[in-house]
Image (tube, grey):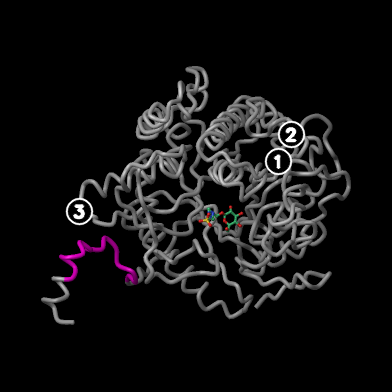
Amino acid sequence: MNLVSLLLTLGLTGVCLGYVYEEDLLYDSFPEGFLWGTATAAYQIEGGWNEDGKGESIWDVFTRIEGNIIDGSSGEVACDSYHKYKEDVALMKSMNMTSYRFSVSWSRIIPRGVGTVNQAGVQYYKNLISELKSAGIIPAITLYHWDLPQALQLQGGWLNSSVADWFEDYARVVFAEFGNDVKLFITLNEPKETSIQGHGTGTMAPGFKGIGDLTYIAAHNQIRAHARAYRLYQAEFAASQGGKVGITLNTNWGEPEEPNNPAHQEASDTFMQFNFGWYGHAIFKDGKYPEVMRRNIDRNSQLQGLNISRLPEFTPEESAMIAGSTDFIGLNFYTSNIVYPGEEDISTPSYFTDDGVKDYQDSTWYGAGSVWLKVTPWGIRSALNWITEEYGGTKDIYITENGFSDLQGNVDDLMRLYYYKHYLNQVLKAIKEDEVKVAGYYAWSLMDNFEWAMGYTEKFGLHSVDFTSPNRYLFTQ
Ligand code: GBH
């Protein structure tokens, strides 16, 4: 194609990319004290689902229902980290990692969700923490990575506003038991997924389908619960323990299809507000939902003949408690979408149409083993910049997950190497060239593990695991 016809094609289709797919690498170093780690989650690795007094979680129940998990598997044994945590730590040590992000299983330490504490469960995490300490690895605890105690689900789970009380009581146990040795706490992991997949599409536990309303209610209670745990730490633990408490939100980057078209720029911002601002605006800013969510959902609810908005409202007291309830921003980032303003379609109430934004992923982008995961290194830098501009840039950002999946289980990791190299370089550019405050990076994941509805078919591990062996043999290549 010659230059004229190329320009003509670009002009006719309106395509003028705002990003360069393969950018040159920046050669420089990460800041002093930057945390390097891998991340995991309790249900995805621990196994030991009913050992030593552990109570059932919603994932123990959800995985038993036929059709929920693509390969019919569950996390009953998973990587067997309940017994093999020392081997996990040895792997991290051999990689020279300085930190490890893991989650605590709520029903392992409080079997019925509230009330009696299970000392054997607490001891498991104490053992893990002391193993990390002797390896010189800084622990970062996620309090909730999707495994709600089933006893609480039977009382409505995240749809019951009392969940904020339950979560605060659980957080008190976690802070009191582990807070002398752990200085980084993440309240909720990707609460958006609990809301959308757990209460909207039904693809994750507890499997509810209420994308127009339950999704927003679950999110509302999660924000209240997060803030309660944060305020508890400030009131009762911060002075003596000196740790930090934050939350991990996930988002894709929404790249405007036409970067110089204001309507597309607005679509990009709306996309980010619905994905990240949904939780971020209230918690990192002013205790309220983003204006565009308030406006759209109030209007759509009315047009749909409802008396009240599908988007709940915080009381003034709640807003005051929620506003600024974080010491840092946790970001899980994997991929991007191209976005553009869509035509209004509000025939059915849905989170997916309330934003009025359409999106797709470019067919030329490299893909991973997960259909949703396309390789877009430039997206992480754009997302980091959006977050920094939107929330003032004063808080540290921790990238609490980033990673690549394959289906083969091969150990040469050709694609994974490409992914990490280019994403990390974009993080470095954000730090060095855009002055974004990134304080740490956790790769997802330390090892292959139970990938939720995809079972063991999608492999995100930096180490391969042989799930057919009772010894869960780890290929460390
Ligand atoms: C994270 O979620 C989780 O925190 C972690 O537990 C998980 O193992 C890891 O990433 C890898 O998946 O509806 O098919 O279009 C990642 C974010 C967002 C990925 C929602 C899947 C829905 C895909 N997830 N997305 S789909």
> In the figure, is residue 29 to the left or right of 405?
left
What is the distance, in whole Å, between disc 2 and disc 1 at their CAs? 7 Å
Residue 318 horizontal/vertical position (percent): 52, 21
> In the figure, is residue 412 to the left or right of 320?
right
**Residue stretch in magenta:** 9-23
Residue 113 horizontal/vertical position (percent): 76, 34
Instruction: Determine if the magenta segment contains residue 11.
Output: yes
Instruction: Check the picture and name the quadrant holding the N terminus.
Output: bottom left
| Residue that numbered label 1 is attached to | 148
User: CB under 8 Å between callouts 2 and 1?
Assistant: yes
| Residue that numbered label 3 is attached to | 260
Furthest residue toward top? 316
* Image mark for residue 152: 2
User: CB under 8 Å between callouts 3 and 2?
Assistant: no
What is the distance, in whole Å, between disc 3 and disc 1 at their CAs? 44 Å
> Given the image, on which type of amino acid does mark 3 rest?
Asn
Which residue lies at the image location 66% right of the left edge and 29% below the top edge?
163
First in residue order: circle 3 vs circle 2: 2
Which residue lies at the image location 69% right of the left edge and 31% below the top edge?
156
Which residue lies at the image location 13% right of the left edge and 78% below the top edge?
3
Q: Which of these two is toward me, 349 or 138?
A: 349
The relative height of residue 115 versus residue 357 in the rendered view (above or below) is above
